[in-house]
Amino acid sequence: MAKHKRKRRYSGPDITGHVDLNPGDQFQTTLNGINDSGETLSEIRGAPVEVTGGLPGEKVVVEVQKRFPERIVAKVVEVLEQAEERVVPECEYFLTCSGCQWQHASYDYQLQLKQARVQREIDKYQSLSQVVVDATIGSESQLGYRNHGRFTVGKKDDGGKIGYINAVTRRFVKIDRCLLMNEQINKVLDLAQDNVAGQTQMAIRAGSNTDSMLIQPRMNLSHIGLVTGEQHYEEEVRGFRFRVAASSFFQVNTSQLSRAIDEVRDLLDLDGTEVMVDAYCGVGVFTVLLAPYVRKIVGIEESASAIEDAGLNSKDILNIEFVEGKTEHILNTLNQHIDVLLLDPPRVGCHPDVLDSVIKLKPEKVLMISCEPEAMARDLNLLCSTGIYSLETIRPVDMFPQTRHVETISMLRLQG
């Protein structure tokens, strides 16, 4: 799951103080562009307004949710003139729970918005600005795709109810069914609802292609037929079964993960002679599924649990080696020529030492997978501004339909 990026703390003057509006107040406005957080922008008497549930060009009535010193946050309560891209949201909790930003936008338009967001980040850098971002690769399923849900348990006044916290109002919202989750997760949610008093959170991971499940934390839910506190679950991708520890990362959209693997393999155009490194390899999904196409592949991962999983997931594959440690510590110590490097860093992007190692090692092909366009563009610029690498392809993949989040695959090639 993509982790939500917190807004920077504002320390300037209170520029909304002269606007006499409070939570619950309503006003009419016309909406402008969409920001990187997925809200539509407007203003009232010079004060910036971020609006959830709107689309550019619409005339709407909005209700103030919260006033910050630097902006007002509101949500659409009535559409007076609607954009042609607007659709009716399927979820009863849309705009209440805040987990989805774009259920009211047609799926084709969501894909365009994600492509445009990546292009905006790329265009900030002269070394990248000539590259045109490919169209976003859509997800076959726009609902029911998530294999991982993390829920909040309401405080004692809510009697053990399960739901989400609204990101703006910080209010608890009980959720009986989340349309983004796969069916197994929603079945657990239904059974566990009102039965987890005393907990603060509940995480459910359920294989989209298996009947395997992991529910955390450990609770006594045997009376409703649920086993909790397991340490691993299993998921299947392209015919391979992967064990995943409770603490290990795994992509939330299994079918799109499979599609992303195809895209990576096609972009790399492997001929079977390459030595490849899969940095930030997690439980070894890309390592295992790309191993048949290279001579040797080395996976680097700092999580001990993920490395243990990766070893089990690749136990019968002879051309794989895993190294436990931080990529910034390990990459520069590999005593061999590297033809292909795959970088799949966390949301914050690559450590500077990793990028320094790339420039020093000079693999012929570098492929980066990123869930944060801003960090990705920064790292790509650091590699391309030297003139050593050129960015050939940048291709968004929609791992997270109905939300602002986007995964992006970037392909770089060594010059000269």
Image: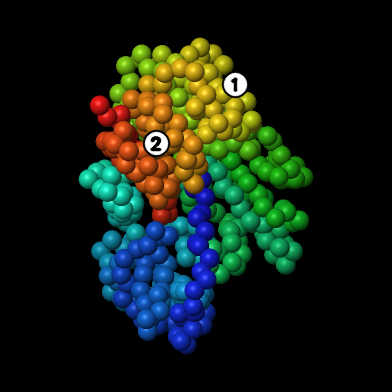
Do we see residue 132 in this rendering? Answer: no
* Crowd tier of the residue under label 1, counting other residues whose Cα lies within 10 Å: few below 14, some 14–19, many 20 or above: some
Q: Is residue 6 left or right of residue 391?
A: right
Asked if 121 appears above or below 93 in the picture, the reply is above
In this view of the protein, which residue sits in the foreground, 351 or 295?
351
Q: Where residue 281 appears, x then y in whole percent? A: 51, 30
Dot 1: what SS? helix
Front tag of 2 and 1: 2
Disc 1 residue type (three-letter):
Leu
Dot 2: what SS? strand
In this view of the protein, which residue sits in the foreground, 123 or 26?
123
Asked if 145 appears above or below 317 in the picture, the reply is below
Q: Where residue 86 appears, x then y in whole percent? A: 31, 63
Q: Spatial distance from mark 2 to mark 1, Cα to Cα?
A: 25 Å
Task: Name the residue located 37 percent from the left edge and 21 percent from the top edge.
Answer: 339
Disc 2 residue type (three-letter):
Met
Q: Badge 1 is on which residue?
A: 312
Task: Name the residue located 36 percent from the left edge and 69 percent from the top edge.
Answer: 41
Task: Name the residue located 53 percent from the left edge and 65 percent from the top edge.
Answer: 9
What numbered label is drawn on residue 329? none
Mark 2 or mark 1, earlier in chain: 1
Q: Quadrant of residue 104?
A: bottom left
Do we see residue 22 in this rendering? Answer: yes
* Crowd tier of the residue under label 2, counting other residues whose Cα lies within 10 Å: few below 14, some 14–19, many 20 or above: many
Asked if 200 appears above or below 95 in the picture, the reply is above
Task: Name the residue located 40 percent from the left edge and 51 percent from the top edge.
Answer: 374
Q: Where residue 369 appears, x then y in whole percent? A: 41, 38
In the picture, which quadrant includes the C terminus?
top left
Asked if 36 appears above or below 30 in the picture, the reply is above
Q: Badge 2 is on which residue?
A: 368
